[in-house]
Every structure is written in C-alpha cells, then in structure tokens.
Amino acid sequence: MDSQKEQEPIVPILPSPALCIPSTIHDTEADGQQDLSKHQGRTRSFPHERGIWASYVFIDYSDSDGWLEIQNECKTLLSDTTTLDFNLIDRMHLSLTKTFTIRHHNINPFVENLREQLAGRRRFRLEFSGLQVYVNEERTRTFLGVRVAEESNGPLNKLVTSLDECLREYKLPLYYTDRAFHVSIMWCLGDREAEVRKELPAIATVFERVYEEEYCDISQQVKKLWFKCGNKSFHFDLI
C-alpha cells in the first residue's frame, strides 16, 4: 500500500487567485461584501478597494473551435458520469502572470512598460500534452486544465521572465517558481480533486481524439498577448 501511495500523481496546488478570471470590480461591492449569487458561489481572494483593479497577462484561447470542442465534450462526459457541477470557463486562456491588483493611476505606465518588454518578441507555437486537475491554495475551487507540453515551455519561460521585470518594478507579485503552464477549461466549487482525478482516464481519451482532429486549431501560432485590467483590455502583437 505504501509503495502505491508513493506512485500517485501529485496534484498541483496553485496559490489563489491564479486560476480565477478576474471580474470587473464594481463600486457596489466597495464595502467588501460579496453577493455570491453574482459570482457562481466564488469568493474574492483579496479584498476589494476602490480604485484598485484585478489584472493579469494571458494568451487567449477563447476564439477557437477546437478548444470549445474539448471543453464541451469533457463537460458532457463529466455530466453523464458524475454528480460534479462543473462550470465552463468563459474565456479560456493561459496565464503568464498571477492575478494581481494595480492602482488606476498606474495602469497606463504599466502598459507602456509591458510594451517595451514585449517589443520584438516573435510568434511561437505551443504543443499540449493532456489533462490535469488543479486546485487553488484555499482549496475552494477545483479546475480541469490542459497541460502545455514540456518541450513548449521555453518561449513561455522567457515571456514570464520579461513580465516579472515589469511586475518587480511595481512591487507586484511575481509568477510561480514552480511553473505549471496550462489552459483551464472548467471549474467547480470545493476541493473535488480526488473525484475528478478518477475521471481523468475517460476524459483523456476525449482530449486525445479532439486534439488529433483539431490539432491545427488548438496548437495555432500565438500571435498576441493580452493584459486584462478590470474592464479594460490591452493587446500586444508578436512579430
């Protein structure tokens, strides 16, 4: 039994709110109280303050039929075989920073710093290598994500190093030391890691089939990066 436990995969536990897609911060929540009905039961991982915006840098995968097919087929299979209440990620993406907060008056200077750091960056293609279960640090949300293949980590590591330079200048949190690049496709409330992991072999078959059929769409060239800051979005074209 002991040897069996040692061989079980370690599920990544990522500090929150890395996997959360930040919503626009509304002044109606300025007193710090959250209406959970508006956020599908999610809780804010950092307190709201007026004039401070939740932000992150990412690669956008939401406008891709191949990604949508993976997402929908995995959701259908899990709905048929489990009682887990999964929610689809509205804007599938690959995060290149943690979710951080920035003051309104720093947004434009920060964007200009990003442009300087990203100037001359070349386009690249990512390969993906299967599904993984992720949980946030508070273990309040469980995510199903698609892993980036290890051989594709090179350009992502270089980008993260450049983005960390911008973050360091504004004393913002840097990206994780142990990096686990992935695209989250759905989530559910609570720590449901053990239950989702049992379903991985079945949904892995779905991923492998769709990935082969829609490879060119799923692994298309990365042509731009995005910075979302509250309700503002900025993009940076790669050459």
Image (cartoon, grey):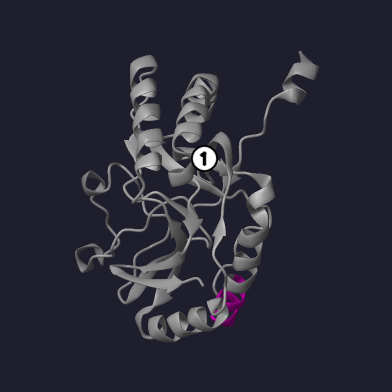
Query: Does any portion of residue 195 appear in the rendered image?
Result: no
* Percent of width and height locating residue 230: 32, 67
Q: Is residue 166 magenta?
A: yes
Q: Where 136 falls versus 160 (above or below)?
A: above
* Percent of width and height locating residue 108: 39, 84
Q: Residues within 10 Å of mark 1 (few under 14, many from 20)?
A: many
Point out the residue furthest to the top here: 1
Count of numbered badges drawn on the protein: 1
Q: Where 175 falls versus 162 (above or below)?
A: above
Point out the residue furthest to the left here: 28
Query: Does any portion of residue 190 appear in the rendered image?
Result: yes
The part of the image, by quadrant, that contains residue 10 is top right
The part of the image, by quadrant, that contains residue 155 is bottom right
Relative to 91, 223 lies left or right = right
Looking at the rendering, the stretch of residues picked out in magenta corresponds to 164-170
Residue identified by numbered label 1: 146
